[in-house]
């Protein structure tokens, strides 16, 4: 049973550029959440997608956007990158309904902005 | 709004000693509570969760936690520490449905010494 996968593993971008991160959920899961984890901090919720719609959003600017595809995979897009966007980006998947709160995390994408 | 506070950013124990990591929560609705572990350069792994029912929950790797509503606490314990337990531990709280985002604490780094 494949778990949550993310790509790429590492990424280096320059300020002002745009980046796309990808996530495939655990088999059978239909909900995807994205989190940003800055160095030495706990993960911060960015947004959650269900049925290809953004269902919840955390306190992140509009530079952060996402998408969910019919196969439940998801992308996180960040425009106009800032140095402060350097972080580990974690994707988590879950199953809507009774266990929507039980989230399984992928290994993350380490983004470095220079 | 929901939040968690983890007391102690660093905890050091000897191998074989009791592990106690502290977490207090704040929630306006009945909370769902979680402990996650993160090893270096990896994603988050769910150790255990409390939703409803029995207040003492057992998780993987010999860890357990007790939900105490009167103290708004959900402390993580393990009777005997092993070197492999050295990692970062995060307490988290969530609601359900459209409020199922996880809100994390700032984490506690557990060091296990010989």
Image: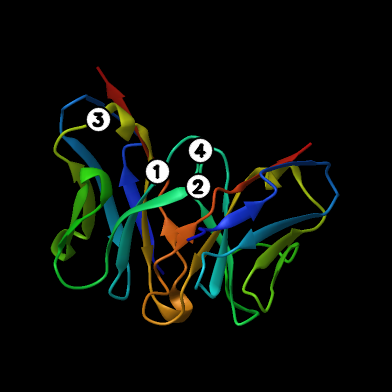
Q: Position of residue A21 (x, y in %)?
A: 71, 56
Q: What is the number of the mark on residue B86? A: none
From the image, state whether disc 2 or disc 1 is nearer to you: 2
| Residue that label 1 marks | B107
Answer above or below: position of B83 versus B104: above
Tell me, yes or no, whether dots 2 and 1 are on the same chain: yes
Question: Left of A70 or right of it: where is B85?
Answer: left
Indicate the chain on which mark 2 is placed: B
| Residue that label 4 marks | A40
**Quarter occupied by residue A74:** bottom right
Q: Are discs 1 and 4 less than 8 Å apart at CB? A: yes
Q: Position of residue A31 (x, y in %)?
A: 54, 73
| Residue that label 3 marks | B82
Q: Position of residue A67 (x, y in %)?
A: 70, 71
| Residue that label 2 marks | B43
Indicate the chain on which mark 4 is placed: A
């Amino acid at each position: 049973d494949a778990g949550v996968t993310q790509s790429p593993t590492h990424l280096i971008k320059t300020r002002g550029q745009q980046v796309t991160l990808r996530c495939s959920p655990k088999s059978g899961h239909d909900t995807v959440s994205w989190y940003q984890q800055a160095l030495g901090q706990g993960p911060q919720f960015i947004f959650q997608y269900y049925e290809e719609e953004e269902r919840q959003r955390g306190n992140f600017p509009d530079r952060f956007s996402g998408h969910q595809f019919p196969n439940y995979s998801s992308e996180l897009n960040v425009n106009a990158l800032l140095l402060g966007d350097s972080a580990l980006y974690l994707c988590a998947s879950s199953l809507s309904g009774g266990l929507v709160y039980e989230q399984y995390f992928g290994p993350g994408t380490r983004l470095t902005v220079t | 709004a929901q939040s968690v506070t983890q007391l102690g950013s660093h905890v050091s124990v000897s191998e074989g000693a009791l592990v106690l990591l502290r977490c207090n929560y704040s929630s306006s609705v009945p909370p769902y509570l979680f402990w996650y572990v993160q090893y270096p350069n990896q994603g988050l792994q769910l150790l255990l969760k409390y939703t409803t029912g029995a207040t003492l929950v057992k998780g993987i790797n010999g860890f357990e936690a007790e939900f105490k509503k009167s103290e708004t606490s959900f402390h993580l314990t393990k009777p005997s520490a092993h070197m492999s337990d050295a990692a970062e531990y995060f307490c988290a709280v969530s609601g359900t449905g459209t409020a199922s985002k996880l809100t994390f604490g700032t984490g506690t780094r557990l060091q296990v010494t010989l």
